[in-house]
Amino acid sequence: MIKLVAFDMDGVLTKCRSSWYYIHKYFGTDNSENIRLFNEGKIDYPTFMYLDTMLWKLKDKNLTREKLSTIFDKMELMKGAKETVQTLKSKGKILVVITGGLDILAEIVCKKLGIEIYYANGLETDEKGLITGKGIVRVDPYRKDLVLQELMKKYSIKREEVAAVGDGEVDIPMFRIAGLSIAFNPFTEDVRSNANIVINSDDLRTILNYIP
């Protein structure tokens, strides 16, 4: 019996597959070079966050968390996300979001869905409330398993009592320590091959068929 379900956020609970891309699209900025440098190991994640955020600040030097929150508030939730969360909660499951995305969006998404626990990365603000460009790293995108392990210890939950739902390479570490791993519209074949269940659907409720 599954007691805890860990969700990735972007592309699983939301239709957009990247909260970073969503903001770049809004401002008309391009972070492809930053992504390349990060994926090639030439910059670390705090540096990636800084470089990305500074692209936004070039467009809006007075950028605040509130402005980003207003932008994110328009992001669409995945079809069936609310019903999925309600159903799992009614069965007594502990639900948690573990994302390398931004806490500004995670707060909005979790509030709309009724999920109380989330782990996400933040952006530093100065005394005037302006985004400084410095990131606050709480979740290493490639080590989400560390957060999940801490939760398992906290709630005294065994591996076979954990389900992880994700769509990208960064979710594979979670898949490897969860008793049940569900790849929801997976990005790559590697993601597919590391999951117990593979689902291609535009409705998150399909995962309910596989979570006991």
Image (cartoon, helix red, strand yellow):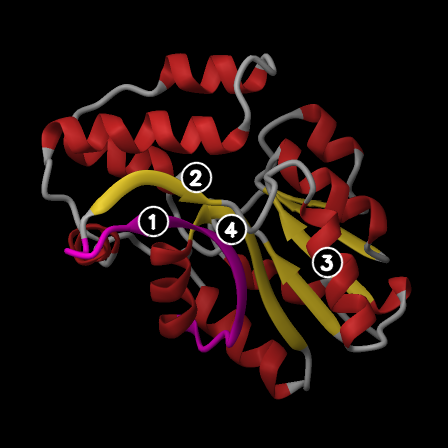
Label 4, label 3: how many angstroms apart (C-alpha)? 17 Å
Contact check, label 4 and label 3, Cβ < 8 Å = no
Q: What numbered label is drawn on residue 124?
A: 1
Question: Which of labels 4 and 1 is toward the front?
Answer: 1
The answer to which image quadrant residue 194 occupies is: top right
Residue at point 65%, 61% (across, down): 6
Q: Position of residue 68 (x, y in %)?
A: 22, 50
Query: Taking 3 as reference, is 132 above or below it?
Result: above
Q: What numbered label is drawn on residue 17?
A: 2
Query: Taking 206 as reference, is 56 above or below it?
Result: above
The answer to which image quadrant residue 114 occupies is: bottom left
Label 2, label 4: how many angstroms apart (C-alpha)? 8 Å
Q: Position of residue 129 (x, y in %)?
A: 19, 56
Residue at point 65%, 53% (across, down): 165
Q: Nearer the viewer, residue 86 or 46?
A: 46
Query: Taking 33 as reference, is 140 above or below it?
Result: below
